[in-house]
Image (cartoon, rainbow, N blue to C red):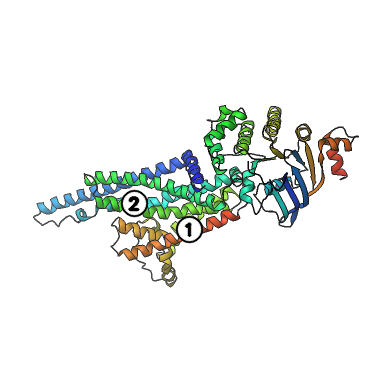
Amino acid sequence: MPANERTSSAIEMRGLSHRYDTDLVLRNVNLTIERGEIFGFLGHNGAGKTTAVNILTTLIKPTAGTASVCGFDVVSDRHEVTRCIGYLPADVRMYPHLTAAENLEFFAKLSGVADPRRAVAQTLDYLECADLAGRRVGSFSTGMRQRIGIAQAIVHQPAVLLLDEPTSGLDPLGVRQLRETIRRLNADHGMTVFMNTHQLSEVAKVCTTIGVLNHGELIYKDTIEATTERFPDENSLEDIYVRMDVAPP
Amino acid sequence: MIATVASQQIRSLKRQRVVWILIGTLLVMTLLAGVIGWSSHRTIIGVYDEAVKILTSKGRPAPANPFLVKPSLSLLSNMVIYITLIGALLALLLGHLTIADDQSGGVGRLIFTRAVTRTSYAIGKVVSVCVVLAAALVGCWAVSVMSLWVVNGGPASGRELERVAVFYAVSWLYLLIFSLVGMITVLATRRRSIGLLSAMGVWLVVTFVVPQFTSGLRPTASLNPIIDPVSTSQTFFRVTSRARPVSIVEQYKQVSGRVLETASAETTRQTIERLAPLATLVIVLVVLLIVMVRRHDFSGTADDE
């Protein structure tokens, strides 16, 4: 697992800003996520969460500031960053005409995995979906696609897993399976998880730390325990989130 | 990484029915070209034999059959038209699918979070269409060789095999242009459907519109495998006809005509000069494709699928 020993943090953002034409979607975000954390990144639609993930995945370059994953800069050390991360987008799609195993082998090869076939078999076994290996992805339900999506994200055993709205379109059983998978990955492999989501109940159940983004600005970051202690009058994370949205702390 | 991207793309294209339908159509048309050539040849010979009988019965001498000296390769001349029509559509579609599937399906987002450079990705895609086009044309070559066997009543000579191979090699270069156009138009447009329509627009202009101006507005120029000299008295079209050296479809037809011995012979240097615009265009389009892939935002998906 590639890692830079100069830093103990998994993800760092320093003065991170991004602009689409005239629209400033990320404003001077400073954020540190330690290794082994399960971080829930909250914010309403258009708050800039996906833009932040796109920067961390090296898909886009920030217009100002820096971001690093495992100590590697997302712009200057792109190659090292891509070996550190696994990414699951909101609506994961793969080559529909190919089987799950063929798709996964392709992504394993792109990540430089030495024995792609073995890595795919191990990953599918770990996620308890080996029965999907020989089936074409085009015939999969949303839940099946999501499981294979997670498999592609972890097939190269990344240090950091970036999930963008991972529960989108999943039924309650799928949501529960995903939650268990995230916990297992974190416990078994010490994987750091960065999760963009609207599902506050899931955040409360699985995350160790949360951050709240409001119109591109990071207005809050703390552990789940500290957050509930800080807002003793609120019954749930949802109530806390609504209160923060009305009156940022 | 180039080999990984290319082999994955070839595997994906192999599983798509529409690709097989177009390749199958091209192979059937190749067979048809041989059948049509053979049939017309037999008809002409039959007419000549009837004419000889009539002349002999009247005691007049019959001239030698001019069609027997016609090269058997020329029977495949219709292939030039099928390549510019069906072959170009196949090439456009192959190019379109290689990029569109990644862009609108969102696979591109996943690919570029991996340790692959955009240049390697673009070259891998080009290699994949090169291989698929080559495979399709090897199939056409085999069908053409079988057709020649039937026409000649025996196996084709080594020289004929070589000439047919050269014809398909030139066709491969020509079709590669359209595959690259198919790729570039997907990257240049926001909607997948607009990308395909734009590529077809380029094909229509190259195949049907440009030759009208460079051949002196001869309506049948586009569907004629043999290019005639410009013969127009109109000043405008005499001027536009000077652009013929850069009209790739006409240069392709000229070179093909020479290879299949339907056009008048010319020097190797002249043939190379005719091929130069095609080769130059391929290089320019490959460079353009790489630049566009490097600049393209793969973080989202296309608007439609």
Quadrant of the snapshot with the C terminus of chain B: top right
Residue lying at the far left of the rendered structure: B59
Closest to the observer: B231 or A56? A56
| Residue B303 visible in rendering | no
Q: Could you tell me residue A190's position as x and y percent?
A: 69, 36
Q: Position of residue A224 (x, y in %)?
A: 81, 36
* Label placed on residue B262: none
Of the numbered discs 2 and 1, the one sitting upstream in the chain is 2
Residue B89 position within the rendered picture, expressed as x and y whole percent measured from the top left: 45, 49
As measured in the structure, the alpha-carbon distance from the residue carrying label 2 to the one carrying label 1 is 21 Å
Q: Residue at x 57, y 28 (%)?
A: A130
Within 10 angstroms of label 2, few (less than 14), some, or many (20 or more) residues? many
Q: Would you call the spot at circle 1 few (<14 residues within 10 Å), some (14-19), or many (20 or more)?
A: few
How many labels sit on residues? Answer: 2
- Which residue appears at 30% of the width and 60% of the height? B263
Residue placed furthest toward the front:
A5
Q: Are marks 2 and 1 in contact (CB under 8 Å)?
A: no
Identify the residue at horizontal 47%, vertical 55% (top origin).
B204
Identity of the amino acid at label 1? Val
Q: Is residue A78 visible?
A: yes
Chain to which the residue tagged by mark 2 belongs: B
Q: What residue is disc 2 on?
A: B78
Q: What subunit carries mark 1?
A: B
Determine which residue is flagged by label 1: B205
Side (left or right) of A33 relative to B244: right
For badge 2, the amino acid type reads Asn
